[in-house]
């Protein structure tokens, strides 16, 4: 038994797979630095990141798996769940050690784990596409802050880019401290300083608008599946405070709340079903569920 | 100004809510003009009402003025309610502003009939044209076909709408005649088949000439009101089946009647809408569309009503125990779909996974099979040997006993009814 220690990046994970095939050390426990506690009785092997090796493994996976399974793999990675890393590692080793088509074996624990974790991540992605509510600011930006269970920004980017092609918008992950900014042409990854942590999202209304969005610096693009974590030094940009919302913002928020009430049929009330569809932790996103303004 | 628009929205959203369809699926529109919006193939529910229905579209009437007097409708002429009408601009700006904030997938526009059918339809067409041509809106649009509108107007509407629908309202002609003497199923069938023929024609032309525009790309749907008139479930589902087949409908919706008047032809005010029955009808609809069941297998002269206490697939299995138990490691995909406790997703996984070795109980559970339900109907690699053959009534009580607690909690209000 040996512990493989990786840094938590996709690159590191793929390198771990590479090393295992190089070294064939038998059973491996995969740990990320965040979840690692030294154990005197088990040998630890530090996996170094090497873009070349990672690339070879990634290409190999793409040869053996169809698009759907590559996406399952990527989604499982974005789940950031501690157990997901070892599922991915074991899955990749299993795929490389077996003839093509082995991913259809749902009787295999790692195949099933990937399919189920990916399903959860896709559901969170879908929920973000549904529950994001933009607020229109006085300077014409549509803004929304979120704190999704999984790291889904890379997955929702294209949806919002294609849909809201004629308006500038920002979607900011308050938990992971980065966001997407669309400037009518391209989507950029941005980081904001002093932004509220998700624990006090409710207090966000009092945040001050400190910087003009035009001054946001441009990090690399997000298209590459491997490179979502860009080091950037972006300017500060906080959620619009009430006084800088556009004139019409509160009118439309109010009309939407009105609509939500009118479209309800009291005789059919079914709170259980309602909460099953919109779990309470998402209510803070929803204009129609908010009591303020 | 903002007070008046609020008032209108409240009236015209309230009047539109009895049309239960809110699907935004089947849209194929791309945002290729750098405008606003695109369609999401499977649709998105942006929120849910407190009764648990999906809110995907801004569902409103253009007006609730109406020259007709259909007994089951809140907008009927004789009903003493507040009336309102949106202008074309108001509908357009509400739609655009809601869409920009990611509140909705698009617009579902219906209307009471003011003056006459063509006058009304022409207004609806103006709204969709303005959205598509002036605002470059590529979101989803569901437009109601007004019965009696001219072919030209319906055709024009179809060039801009994603889906069109026209409601059967009552499952049988007799039921409809009772409550809406001025209407007939023929009024519905004529535009349905006109639009269907146009869809086919446009598709044919598109094969030859790429630039032919889309025509109602998300297809047509209809709705029946359930429980206002005394039809059996068999009547309802046979009508649905015929309309699915004859008009290639995308969806049939079943809307449990909510008493809105004390007309003595209708259930009294305050009686509960038949929600479980509605749910069972939807389950039957799914079994017909996705599970390969023929309507007559589920409903026939011997069984004209769906069971209320168990779902229609379980009912069918219990009536047909001679088909079971089946060996999950051998039997066809079609038959797996018919096993209670196994859905489409699990069925697909089973046929893939069993190629790698005989499946065991624990694997079935992990794959997502509701094993406690399915176990009465299947055999797998490690199924314990069972001496006794159970009767269908025994199996039913086993299954009910297991799901009872959950069931009672869910539906206590409605169960009292039956
Ligand atoms: S024609 Fe339509 S809006 Fe008018 S009363 Fe009948 S169902 Fe209602």
Image (cartoon, helix red, strand yellow):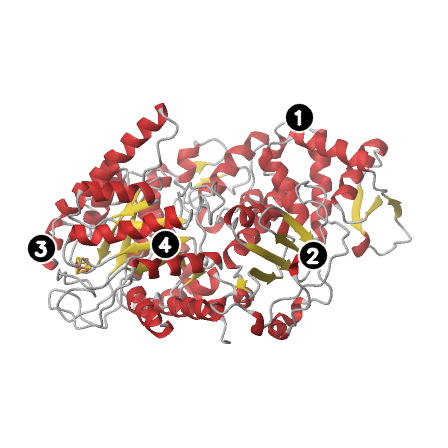
Contact, CB < 8 Å: mark 4 with mark 3?
Answer: no
* Occupied quadrant, residue A53: top right
Measured from the top left, where is residue B185 in percent x and y? Answer: 14, 47
Whether marks 2 and 4 lie on the same chain? no
Element on which disc 1 rests: loop
**Would you call the spot at circle 2 few (<14 residues within 10 Å), some (14-19), or many (20 or more)?**
some
List the residue tagged with mark 2.
Answer: A216
N-term mark: 4 or 3:
4
Look at the numbered disc 4 and give the secondary structure of its residue: strand
Q: Crowding near pointer 4: few (<14 within 10 Å), some, many (20+)?
A: many
Cα distance in 3D space between marks 2 and 4? 35 Å
- Residue ID for mark 3: B182
Element type at mark 2: loop
Residue farthest toward the top in the current orientation of the protein = B208
Query: Marks 1 and 4, how far apart in space?
Result: 50 Å
Chain letter behind tag 2? A
Name the residue furthest right.
A40
Image position of A113 with respect to A275: above or below: above
Question: Where residue B316 sits in the image (x, y, percent)?
Answer: 32, 45
Residue B47 in the image: x percent, y percent? Answer: 45, 60
On screen, residue A232 versus residue B278, left or right, reads: right
Q: List the residue tagged with mark 4.
A: B107
**Residue located 33% across and 54% down the image:** B108
Q: To which chain does the residue with label 1 belong?
A: A
Foreground label between 3 and 2: 2
Task: Nearest to the eye among marks 1 and 3: give it.
Answer: 3
């Amino acid at each position: 038994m040996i512990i493989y220690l990786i840094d938590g990046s996709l690159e590191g994970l793929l390198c771990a797979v590479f090393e295992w095939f190089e070294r064939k050390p038998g059973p491996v426990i995969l740990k990320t630095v965040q979840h690692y506690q030294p154990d005197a009785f088990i040998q630890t092997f530090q996996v170094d990141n090497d873009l070349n090796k990672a690339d070879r493994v990634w290409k190999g996976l793409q040869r053996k798996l169809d698009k759907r399974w590559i996406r399952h793999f990527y989604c499982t990675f974005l789940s950031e769940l501690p157990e997901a890393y070892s599922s991915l590692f074991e899955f990749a080793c299993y795929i490389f050690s077996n003839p093509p088509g082995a991913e259809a074996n749902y009787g295999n624990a790692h195949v099933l784990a990937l399919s189920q974790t990916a399903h959860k991540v896709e559901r969170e992605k879908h929920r973000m596409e549904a529950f994001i509510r933009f607020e229109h600011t006085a300077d014409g930006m549509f803004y929304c802050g979120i704190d999704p269970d999984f790291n889904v920004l890379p997955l929702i980017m294209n949806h919002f880019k294609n849909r809201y092609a004629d308006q500038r918008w920002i979607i900011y992950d308050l938990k992971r401290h980065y966001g997407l900014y669309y400037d009518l042409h391209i989507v950029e990854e941005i980081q904001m300083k002093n932004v509220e942590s998700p624990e006090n999202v409710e207090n966000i209304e009092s945040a001050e608008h400190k910087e003009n969005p035009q001054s946001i610096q441009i990090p690399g693009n997000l298209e590459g599946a491997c490179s979502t974590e860009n080091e950037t030094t972006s300017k500060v940009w906080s959620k619009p405070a009430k006084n800088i919302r556009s004139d019409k913002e509160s009118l439309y928020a109010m009309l939407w709340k009105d609509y939500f009430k009118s479209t309800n049929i009291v005789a059919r009330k079914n709170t259980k079903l309602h909460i099953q569809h919109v779990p309470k932790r998402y209510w803070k996103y929803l204009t129609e569920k908010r009591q303020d303004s | 100004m903002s007070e008046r628009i609020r008032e209108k929205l409240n009236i015209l959203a309230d009047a539109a809510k009895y049309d239960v369809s809110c699907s935004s699926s089947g849209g194929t529109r791309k945002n290729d003009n750098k405008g606003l919006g695109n369609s999401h193939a499977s649709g998105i529910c942006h929120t849910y009402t407190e009764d648990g229905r999906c809110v995907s579209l801004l569902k409103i009437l253009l007006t609730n003025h109406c020259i007709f007097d259909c007994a089951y409708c809140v907008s009927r002429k004789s009903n003493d309610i507040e009336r309102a009408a949106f202008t074309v601009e108001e509908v357009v700006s509400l739609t655009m502003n809601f869409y920009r904030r990611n509140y909705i997938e698009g617009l579902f526009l219906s209307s009471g009939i003011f003056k006459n059918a063509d006058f009304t339809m022409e207004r609806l067409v103006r709204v969709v044209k303005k959205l598509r041509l002036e605002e470059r809106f590529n979101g989803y649009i569901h437009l109601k076909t007004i019965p009696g509108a001219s072919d030209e107007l319906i055709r024009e509407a179809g060039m801009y709408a994603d889906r069109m629908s026209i409601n059967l309202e009552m499952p049988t002609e007799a039921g409809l005649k009772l409550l809406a003497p001025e209407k007939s199923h023929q009024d519905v069938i004529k535009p349905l088949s006109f639009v269907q023929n146009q869809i086919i024609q446009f598709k044919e032309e598109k094969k030859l000439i790429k630039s032919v525009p889309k025509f109602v790309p998300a297809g047509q749907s209809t709705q029946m009101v359930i429980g206002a008139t005394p039809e059996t479930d068999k009547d309802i589902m046979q009508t649905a089946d015929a309309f699915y087949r004859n008009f290639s409908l995308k969806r049939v919706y079943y809307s449990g009647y909510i008493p809105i008047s004390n007309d003595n032809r209708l259930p009294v005010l305050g009686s509960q809408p038949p929600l479980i029955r509605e749910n069972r009808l939807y389950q039957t609809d799914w079994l017909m569309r996705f599970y390969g069941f023929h309507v007559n297998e589920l409903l026939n002269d011997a069984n004209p009503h769906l069971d209320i206490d168990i779902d229609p697939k379980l009912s069918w299995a219990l009536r047909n125990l001679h088909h079971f138990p089946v060996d999950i490691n051998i039997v066809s995909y079609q038959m797996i779909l018919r096993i209670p406790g196994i859905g489409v997703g699990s069925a697909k996984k089973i046929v893939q996974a069993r190629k790698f070795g005989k499946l065991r109980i624990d694997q079935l559970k992990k794959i997502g099979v509701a094993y406690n339900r399915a176990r009465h109907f299947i055999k797998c690699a490690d199924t314990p040997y069972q001496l006794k053959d159970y009767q269908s009534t025994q199996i039913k009580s086993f299954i009910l006993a297991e799901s009872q607690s959950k069931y009672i909690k869910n539906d206590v209000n409605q169960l009292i009814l039956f």
